[in-house]
């Protein structure tokens, strides 16, 4: 015989089921699309209907579209050289008139790893190099992590990550070399069986900088294997066609190519070079922004900006980025309490600070920051 409690419980379930059936599927989909990725991952376990809805290709595509319209800053912090803490917070709107503001960071996950040598980010993915060619890939939105197949190492190896916005694929380019001979291999992440394939190239070269991917083209600096003197150039790798082209900057613009002081960046959707100089006596930081003047990117012009610091802790050691169309972002290399991110608007020549709350757990730890992080629920 059923107890009174069991009958009452069954009545509640019946009523819940009755009203649940009246909720249209498209409304459930709309509700789920408005939730953060961490909640959606948990809601897969609610019922088979929700799991199948979240797994549908049209749902993950719609979620990615919404996420792309509200990019975030991704923070990765090493702790005891064993784990990475990934926190993402809404990317502040660059047109605000406020001199200071505050936003919260949301903890995503821990990524177990040993001593890492390289840490990077592209789209929705974080990649970590633990050994010479041991790469771990992680999607903070789904918690999925996997290791890339290793490649044979010769005298040297360089690895780059690029994104094809047309096919919506992430590809990995690895170049190994020995005695003046290169071996170029590509791997596509979004395939059932990941394997390296060798691609052809016409111009042997040795990469000397990190890469930046803009609108499906991966750019990095390299020395051409020319005799008798190696020639510095910018390599352009088309991620979709897997073909190379090259930019040879004129002598008058070689300042944009200095590998020790400049970084290739995405500025307003175009390739540019950023050089940062510090002037501690004036408590300010100067930026030299090199931008191409012609379609062939052979002639570059230099523009200098001075960033007035808002707080003394930003003077000593910062890393920098370009965000949106007209802002430079400075982020301290270690987490402090409070923890601030600094913005400088190139058009208005105004500065502002944003406090990032929720990162006390990794206070004092080295921090890596990446702009334009998007959330993608697609499982790889």
Image (cartoon, rainbow, N blue to C red):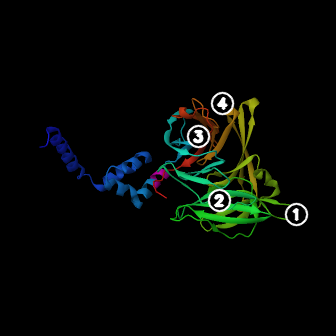
For marks 4 and 1 on the same chain, the one whose residue lies earlier in the sequence: 1
Q: CA distance from mark 4 to mark 1?
A: 47 Å
Q: Which residue is mark 4?
A: 313
Structural distance between the alpha carbons of marks 2 and 4: 34 Å
Residue 308, compared with residue 63, is above or below; it is above
> Closest to the observer: 347 or 215?
215
Quarter of the image for residue 213 reads bottom right
Q: Residue 66 colored magenta? A: yes
Q: CA distance from mark 4 to mark 3?
A: 19 Å
Q: Nearer the viewer, residue 298 or 140?
A: 140
Residue 93 seen in render: no
Residue drawn where x is 67% and y is 55% of the image:
211
Q: Earlier in the sequence, mark 2 or mark 4?
A: 2
> Could you say which is closer to the camera, residue 303 or residue 332?
332
Quick one: 45 or 162, which is closer to the camera?
Answer: 45
Mark 3 secondary-structure assignment? strand
Q: Secondary structure at mark 4?
A: helix
Q: Which residues are magenta?
A: 64-68
Q: Which residue is mark 1?
A: 228
The mark found on residue 77 in the picture is 3
Question: On the picture, is 173 further left or further right than 110?
Answer: right
């Amino acid at each position: 015989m059923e107890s009174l409690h069991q009958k009452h419980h069954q009545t509640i379930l019946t009523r819940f089921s009755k009203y649940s059936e009246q909720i249209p599927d498209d409304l459930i989909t709309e509700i789920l699309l408005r939730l953060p990725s961490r909640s959606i991952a948990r809601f897969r376990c609610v019922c088979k209907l929700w799991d199948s809805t979240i797994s549908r290709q049209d749902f993950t595509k719609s979620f990615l579209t919404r996420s792309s319209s509200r990019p975030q800053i991704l923070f990765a912090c090493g702790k005891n050289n064993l784990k990475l803490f990934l926190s993402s917070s809404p990317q502040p709107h660059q047109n605000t008139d406020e001199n200071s503001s505050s936003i919260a960071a949301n903890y995503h996950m821990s990524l177990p790893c040993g001593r890492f040598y390289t840490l990077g980010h592209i789209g929705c993915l974080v990649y970590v190099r633990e050994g010479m060619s041991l790469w771990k890939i992680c999607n903070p939105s789904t918690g999925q992590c996997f290791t890339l197949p290793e490649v044979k190492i010769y005298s040297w190896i360089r690895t780059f990550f690029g994104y094809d916005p047309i096919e919506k694929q992430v590809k990995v380019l690895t170049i190994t070399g020995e005695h003046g001979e290169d071996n170029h291999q590509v791997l596509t992440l979004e395939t059932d069986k990941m394997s390296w394939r060798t691609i052809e190239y016409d111009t042997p070269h040795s990469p000397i900088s990190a890469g930046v991917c803009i609108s499906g083209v991966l750019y990095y600096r390299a020395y051409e294997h020319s005799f008798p003197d190696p020639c510095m150039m910018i390599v352009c790798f088309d991620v979709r066609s897997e073909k190379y082209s090259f930019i040879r900057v004129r002598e008058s613009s070689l300042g944009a190519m200095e590998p020790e002081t400049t970084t290739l960046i995405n500025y307003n959707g175009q390739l540019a070079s950023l050089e940062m100089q510090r002037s501690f006596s004036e408590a300010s930081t100067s930026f030299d922004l090199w931008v191409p003047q012609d379609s062939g990117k052979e002639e570059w012009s230099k523009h200098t900006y001075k960033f007035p610091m808002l707080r003394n802790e930003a003077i000593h050691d910062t890393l920098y980025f370009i965000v949106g169309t007209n802002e430079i972002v400075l982020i301290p290399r270690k987490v402090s309490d409070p923890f601030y991110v600094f913005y400088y608007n190139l058009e208005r020549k105004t500065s502002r600070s944003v406090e990032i709350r929720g990162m006390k757990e990794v206070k004092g730890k080295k921090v890596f920051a990446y702009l334009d992080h998007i959330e993608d629920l697609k499982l790889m």
